[in-house]
Amino acid sequence: MTFINHSEQNLHYEQQIDYIENEIRALQATMPTGDTESLPAGLAESLDELFINLHTVIALKCVSTIAPENTLIVDAIQHQQPLKVLEVGKLALLMSEQIELLQEALAQFDGDAQSTAMMKQTIAEFFIARQVLVDTAISDSSEADNFCDCSSCLQSTYHQFTAGFDYVCTQCETAFFK
């Protein structure tokens, strides 16, 4: 088995992202410009597939950045397997914290335009990755998978993601991970 260190893996994801973005640009260049023309057959489907692939690679990159030891989530994403809601909740919380840290750093950052753009891109990637993980966990799981023991109301109750990506008890609205 070959082990790839984190920087090599990150470079691999960056190369995949660049390749997919170039494919998207190439397809978009073939799109008709007028309102009266319709998209060629299969173009919309190809673009959708490329965007899904792009978002998957971004999610892989961010998960491996924030939790490199969590190979189960990376494997599940790569093989399009169902994700466990609690694991996704923990990662979503970590990603939210990372986004906050990056935004604070950006506010205090006094760098060149290229560095600022790269930092903004990283923030956007974490937003995309968090959404991909949560959407996948929600669509792949049954309601029964979201029943957890609540530490506040001491019941096994249904938990759900909020708009802020907290994972909360629907009975007492206590955040699961805080």
Image: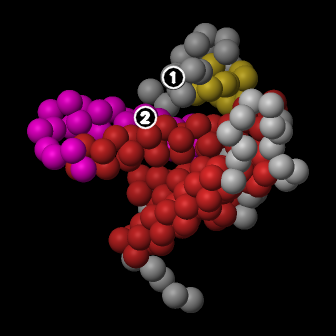
Here the colouring is: secondary structure
Amino acid carrying mark 2 in the image: Ser
Q: Is residue 73 visible?
A: no
In the figure, is residue 157 to the left or right of 129?
right
Of helix, strand and loop, which one carries label 2? Answer: helix
Of helix, strand and loop, which one carries label 1? Answer: loop
Give the x, y percent position of residue 10: 42, 67
Residue placed under numbered mark 1 in the picture: 164
Residue at (83, 39) in percent of width and height: 38
Residue placed under numbered mark 2 in the picture: 96
Question: In the image, which disc is placed on residue 14?
Answer: none
Residue at (80, 43) in percent of width and height: 39
Residue at (40, 75) in percent of width and height: 8
- Which numbered disc, 2 or 1, marks the residue that appears first in the sequence? 2
Give the x, y percent position of residue 167: 58, 27
Inspect the magenta stretch and tell me whether residue 92 lies in it. yes
Depth check: 121 or 100 in front?
121
Give the x, y percent position of residue 74: 59, 61
Magenta span: predominant SS is helix
Q: Write down the region rendered in magenta.
A: 86-114
Amino acid carrying mark 1 in the image: Gly
Identify whether 131 is placed above or below 57: above
